[in-house]
Image (tube, grey):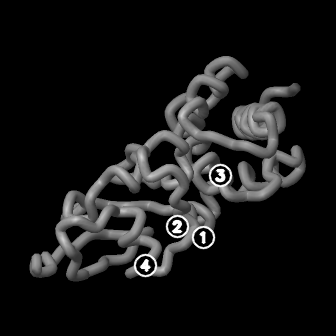
């Protein structure tokens, strides 16, 4: 049997010291050991985007990253972005535009949308669609999601619809 490995990292602004098996992925570590269940596991192949988190300011698929790979890193989950208020306006736009239905994809979608808006404050609809193309949603048909992100971008930059 493989022995656990010690890791130390920052999660949502708090230092975390843990022991992990070398084979545990970041999504399972966040969900099972840290009880941060907003990071969802969908396909476990990095395709659906439900497990999207931010590692050192880059979004990644946490199902494809081993927990030992984030030793010394800064990780932000949807709980961290939500608690800090960073995505409050985006969450409100998702609600107002009915851009969430079952809600399973929503945390990953919010993480990806916020990543885009941090990098490009005023993306057009095509750019939003392109950036979110790695996140699957089986309920909404995407139009409401694109509307919500566009609305948030316009509000943040003071532009009108």
C-alpha separation, residue under disc 3 versus residue under disc 1: 19 Å
C-alpha separation, residue under disc 1 versus residue under disc 4: 20 Å
Is 11 above or below relative to 139?
below
Which mark's residue is nearer the viewer, 3 or 1? 3
Counting residues from the start of the chain, the first of labels 2 and 3 encountered is 2
Pick whichever, 60 or 150, lies toward us.
Answer: 60
C-alpha separation, residue under disc 2 versus residue under disc 4: 17 Å
**75 displayed left or right of 123:** left
Give yes or no for contact between labels 1 and 2 (Cβ–Cβ under 8 Å): yes
Helix, strand, or loop for circle 1?
Answer: helix
At 72% from the left and 21% from the top, the residue drawn is 125
Marker disc for residue 83 = 1
Where is residue 18? Give x, y as percent: 24, 81
Where is residue 7? Give x, y as percent: 19, 73
What is the quadrant of the C terminus in the image? top right
Marker disc for residue 32 = 4
**100 displayed left or right of 118:** right
Counting residues from the start of the chain, the first of labels 1 and 4 encountered is 4
Q: Which residue is mark 3?
A: 105
Q: Quadrant of residue 9?
A: bottom left
At 44% from the left and 69% from the top, the residue drawn is 12
Pick whichever, 39 or 90, lies toward us.
Answer: 39
Helix, strand, or loop for circle 2?
Answer: helix
Give yes or no for contact between labels 3 and 1 (Cβ–Cβ under 8 Å): no
What is the quadrant of the N terminus in the image? bottom left
Q: Which residue is mark 2?
A: 80
Counting residues from the start of the chain, the first of labels 2 and 4 encountered is 4
Helix, strand, or loop for circle 3?
Answer: loop
C-alpha separation, residue under disc 3 versus residue under disc 4: 19 Å
Where is residue 2? Give x, y as percent: 10, 76
């Amino acid at each position: 049997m493989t022995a656990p490995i010690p890791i130390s990292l920052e999660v949502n602004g708090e230092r975390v010291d843990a022991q992990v098996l070398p084979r545990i992925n970041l999504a399972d570590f966040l969900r099972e050991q840290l009880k941060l269940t907003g990071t969802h596991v969908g396909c476990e192949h990095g395709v659906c985007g439900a497990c999207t988190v931010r590692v050192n300011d880059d979004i990644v698929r946490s199902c494809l990253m081993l927990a030992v790979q984030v030793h010394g890193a800064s990780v932000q989950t949807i709980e961290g972005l939500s608690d800090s208020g960073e995505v409050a306006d985006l969450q409100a736009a998702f609600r107002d535009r009915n851009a969430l239905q079952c809600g399973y994809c929503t945390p990953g979608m919010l993480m990806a949308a916020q990543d885009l808006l941090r990098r490009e404050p005023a993306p057009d609809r095509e750019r939003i669609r392109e950036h979110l193309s790695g996140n699957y949603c089986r309920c909404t048909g995407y139009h409401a999601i694109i509307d919500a992100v566009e609305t948030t971008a316009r509000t943040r930059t003071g532009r009108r619809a």
